Amino acid sequence: MAAALLLLLLLLVPPVGLLAALAFLTRPRAARIPLKGRHVFITGGSSGIGLALATAAAREGARVSILARNAARLDDARAAIRLATGQDVGVHQADVRDAAAVARALYEAGPVDVLVCNHGVFVPQELEKQDMEEVKWMVDINLMGTFHLIKAALPAMKARTRETSLPASIAIMSSQAGQVGVYGYTAYSASKFALTGLAESLQHEVVSDDIHVSLIFPPDTETPGLVEEKKKRPELTTIIADSSGGMKADDVAMKALNGIKSGRFIVPCNFEGAMLAIATSGLTPQSSPLIAFVEVIGAGLMRFVALCFQWNWFSTIENWYAKNKKHG
């Protein structure tokens, strides 16, 4: 009996010790971001994930503002949210590429407690075949648009946290293509990978203001944008992308909102996303000792799994080109 207890103790001490060390090391400290009665500002809020996020936040009692380019779609979204929740929302028409228009919209909306940079565009194409204006369009919206929003919102957000003594959040919608490069997504992945560097650095800059940054990584999501994208995908992109499961916008919105409220830095949305989060955790901030424990323990295994995926993808590409050259 004593030997069994000693063996059990030896097995438990290393994990318990590691957890204790991680509880000390993990930063920023965990926080709960309340939504009820607070101002949630969501870009890309007229459809897809943005509309689902706005509806979910309104249900939780938040004061919601949405921003998009199309006035008619904004009006339709406001009506849909009112019908679903009984709550009215503020609507703001602007192109996120226009820094002045974004600043005006945020000034009109008032100080923000939770900023959700959900806008994004994507056109899949091999870089050699893709027009550089199309590449610039994606970078300007996906990356520079996010800079414009955060830059415009930040001063009032900082003042707001000091005034209310409540933590705030800046959430950035990335993509699983922002965690791993995929054939045909050269420009899109670049615009999304850049958001990780933005988010990591920004978290350092705003942690003393009690502002928590969340980086959300949805998979293919059933939105109007995905329907259009699938029409233009190279065949190889479709083969590789279809190996990962898709999600409905409402499900992504719920995962994202839960991650924002928990103050989590990395917010995966499905099982594959959770595995990618472990595989790519690297130097990313982590507020949960338990998740940090899984990352530390699982890193080596996930590297092996990642190599298996890469082997599969490269084999698929080689076989596809060999087949098409033969028939060409």
Image (cartoon, rainbow, N blue to C red):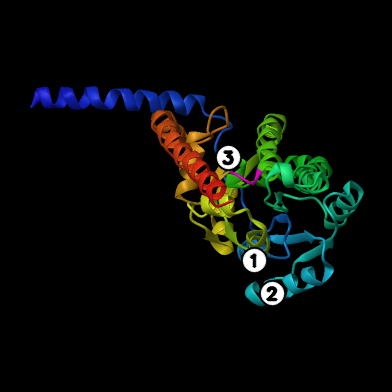
Residue 185 location in percent, x, y? 65, 45
Q: Secondary structure at mark 1?
A: helix
Estimate how packed mark 2 is, as few (under 14), some (14 to 19) or many (20 or more) residues with alpha carbons within 10 Å: some
Q: Earlier in the sequence, mark 2 or mark 1?
A: 1
Q: Are marks 2 and 1 in contact (CB under 8 Å)?
A: yes
Whether residue 264 is visible, yes or no, is no
Residue 187 figure quarter: top right
Q: CA distance from mark 1 to mark 3?
A: 27 Å
Instruction: Residue 286 in the image: state x and y as whole percent.
Output: 54, 33
Q: Which label was assigned to residue 179?
A: 3
Q: Position of residue 90 (x, y in %)?
A: 79, 64
Residue visible at 51% across and 55% down in the picture = 242
Does 103 appear in magenta? Answer: no
Q: Which residues are magenta?
A: 179-185
Q: Which numbered marker is on residue 80? A: 2
Three-letter code for the amino acid on which mark 3 is drawn = Gln
